[in-house]
């Protein structure tokens, strides 16, 4: 009994410790962001890495999700003769929920993991100590450009995801299920408001912050050689995905 | 006044006590070599000097300024006085040799690209390396990586140079070349140098003073000649590299 309680207690302490480390890194990232030198070239390099390089994966994920969503809702709605709402459901779901979350999760898997591996390798090969010894704060040199890239590029990827998801739904509904294209287009925009777009973009920006910071933090606190780097990489993806899904609920509650 | 003064340093990692009341001073222009077995806290000591680790107790004074009381920002600025060479070089593997050496110059000086190029060439000349600027660290041998690490460490013309196990993993000939290089740089730049090693041949060659770290504190120190004459059984065993003795009794 004592052992079980002991284990539970340790898990709780570890959880709060990790939360503390994460928020401390968040605070220090913002503090170092304001200090010169501003390595704008590196900011752009990271933006290309997070944004441009993620386009193919975002393209496939959101387009196919839009297509599946249209197919599924059409089948379901046909039972109650409500097929005309398929377009609205696809558009609302993509804009408010699916595009930001899917983009967040996919980029967490692609970029969050590679950031953790990169910084983790730097940790185990003493490159982070070397950075400090060269009077360069790793938070400023490594975290700041990555977090900025995440916060700026995720909303752009989300816009792309919104458009592709809606287009995917359109393709399935019109080409496969023979819905009237004009009516489908009208229905797509009928119930949409600008807040649906903006709140989705805010979510994407927050997810960009979460996935980049989590990747950086996991990499920074790597220990135990190559195995540790592998562990940090896996943890970065799992933690970022969980935080994104949890935050998604609270953001949805707060924003809508 | 000593340039570096470590005063009663204590450091623990979990339950493992690494440094206990460790004190030592280093004078201006002196070359101090700290020797000791693996896991005795040599690297930990070096990391305290440059502020990569903060002690649980005790003070680290650099030219009379207590760096343990400094904020991260102050410490970051203060580190420009240091040059540190790491065990395996710790070169940035995403950059070429040129970019590695130019890195501190680009971040901390207002030098033009031309001036940076000239300074990098000068640093590479100091460590006797030629035509390696475009190479990646992975294309270099162990000895070359150390030398590029030295070149990067001296690029900002530091007042204090720190060498972490500069010859570990190198063959005896290359180790001797590296020792000569440290000696040469030390004399040319006139810096205060702290080296940690367990290679006694290198230690005696480059040191003005040798100190031995054992169980978290300095148990013996003196000029290389005095150190070699030491009657401390722990020091004797270490110098002679014997398997039997107080170091291996437990």
Image (tube, rainbow, N blue to C red):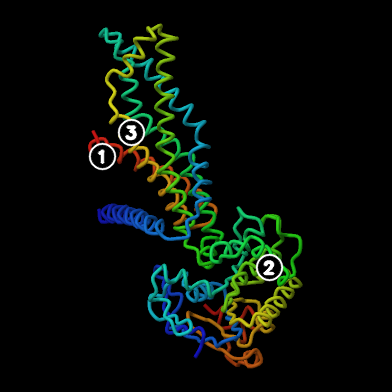
Q: Which of marks 3 and 1 is nearer the N terminus?
A: 3
Within 10 Å of disc 1 (Cα), the crowding (few <14, some 14-19, many 20+) is: few
Q: Check if mark 3 and mark 2 are on a common chain.
A: no
Please give the chain letter of the residue carrying mark 3: A
Left or right of B47? Residue A241 is left
Q: Position of residue B50 (x, y in %)?
A: 50, 73
x 43%, y 27%: residue: A62
Left or right of B203? Residue A226 is left
- Residue A250: image tag: 1
Q: Name the residue under label 3.
A: A200
Gap between marks 3 and 1, in whole Å? 13 Å
In what element is the residue under mark 2?
A: helix
x 32%, y 25%: residue: A93
Q: Check if mark 3 and mark 1 are on a common chain.
A: yes
Q: In this view, does B141 lie above or below B194?
A: above
Gap between marks 1 and 2, in whole Å? 53 Å
Q: Where is residue A57 in the image (x, y as percent from the top left)?
A: 49, 31
Please give the chain letter of the residue carrying mark 1: A
- Residue A104: image tag: none
In what element is the residue under mark 1?
A: helix
Q: Position of residue B4 (x, y in %)?
A: 50, 83
Question: In the depicted view, which residue is nearer to us: A48 or A235?
Answer: A48
Q: Name the residue under label 2.
A: B147
Q: In this view, does B108 lie above or below B137?
A: below
Gap between marks 3 and 2, in whole Å? 52 Å
Within 10 Å of disc 3 (Cα), the crowding (few <14, some 14-19, many 20+) is: many
């Amino acid at each position: 009994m004592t052992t079980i309680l002991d284990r539970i207690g340790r898990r709780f302490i570890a959880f709060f410790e990790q939360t503390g480390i994460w928020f401390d890194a968040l605070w220090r990232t913002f503090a170092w962001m304001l200090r010169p030198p501003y390595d704008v070239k590196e900011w752009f390099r990271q933006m290309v890495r997070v944004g441009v390089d993620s386009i193919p994966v975002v393209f496939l994920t959101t387009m196919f999700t839009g297509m599946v969503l249209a197919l599924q809702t059409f089948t379901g709605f046909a039972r109650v003769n409500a097929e005309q709402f398929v377009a609205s459901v696809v558009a609302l779901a993509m804009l408010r929920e699916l595009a930001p979350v899917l983009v967040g999760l996919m980029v967490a898997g692609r970029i969050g993991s590679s950031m953790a591996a990169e910084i983790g390798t730097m940790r185990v090969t003493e490159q982070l100590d070397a950075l400090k010894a060269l009077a360069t704060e790793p938070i400023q040199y490594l975290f700041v450009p990555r977090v900025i890239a995440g916060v700026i590029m995720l909303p752009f990827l989300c816009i792309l995801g919104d458009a592709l998801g809606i287009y995917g739904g359109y393709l399935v509904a019109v080409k496969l299920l023979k819905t009237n294209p004009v009516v489908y287009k009208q229905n797509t925009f009928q119930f949409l408001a600008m807040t649906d777009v903006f709140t989705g973009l805010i979510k994407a920006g927050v997810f960009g912050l979460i996935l980049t910071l989590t990747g950086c933090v996991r990499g920074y606190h790597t220990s135990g050689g190559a195995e540790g780097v592998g562990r940090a990489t896996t943890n970065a993806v799992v933690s970022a995905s969980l935080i994104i899904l949890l935050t998604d609920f609270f953001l949805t509650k707060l924003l809508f | 006044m000593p340039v570096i003064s470590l005063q009663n340093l204590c450091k623990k990692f979990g339950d493992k006590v690494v440094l206990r009341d460790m004190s030592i001073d280093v004078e201006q222009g002196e070359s101090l070599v700290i020797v000791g077995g693996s896991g005795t806290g040599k690297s930990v000591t070096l990391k305290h000097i440059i502020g990569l680790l903060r002690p649980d107790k005790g003070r680290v004074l650099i030219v009379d300024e207590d760096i343990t009381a400094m904020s991260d920002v102050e410490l970051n600025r203060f580190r420009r006085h240091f040059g540190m060479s790491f065990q395996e070089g710790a070169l940035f593997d995403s950059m070429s040799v040129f970019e590695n050496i130019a890195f501190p110059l680009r971040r901390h000086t207002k030098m033009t690209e031309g001036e940076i190029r000239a300074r990098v060439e000068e640093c590479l000349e100091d460590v006797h390396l030629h035509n390696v600027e475009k190479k990646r660290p992975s294309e270099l041998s162990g000895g070359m990586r150390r030398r590029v690490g030295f070149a990067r460490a001296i690029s900002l013309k530091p007042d204090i140079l720190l060498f972490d196990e500069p010859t570990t993993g190198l063959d005896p000939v290359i180790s001797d070349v590296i020792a000569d290089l440290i000696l040469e740089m030390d004399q040319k730049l006139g810096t205060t140098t702290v080296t940690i090693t367990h290679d006694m041949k290198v230690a005696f060659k480059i040191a003005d003073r040798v100190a031995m770290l054992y169980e978290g504190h300095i148990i013996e120190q003196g000029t290389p000649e005095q150190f070699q004459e030491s009657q401390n059984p722990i020091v004797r065993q270490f110098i002679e590299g014997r398997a039997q003795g107080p170091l291996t009794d437990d």
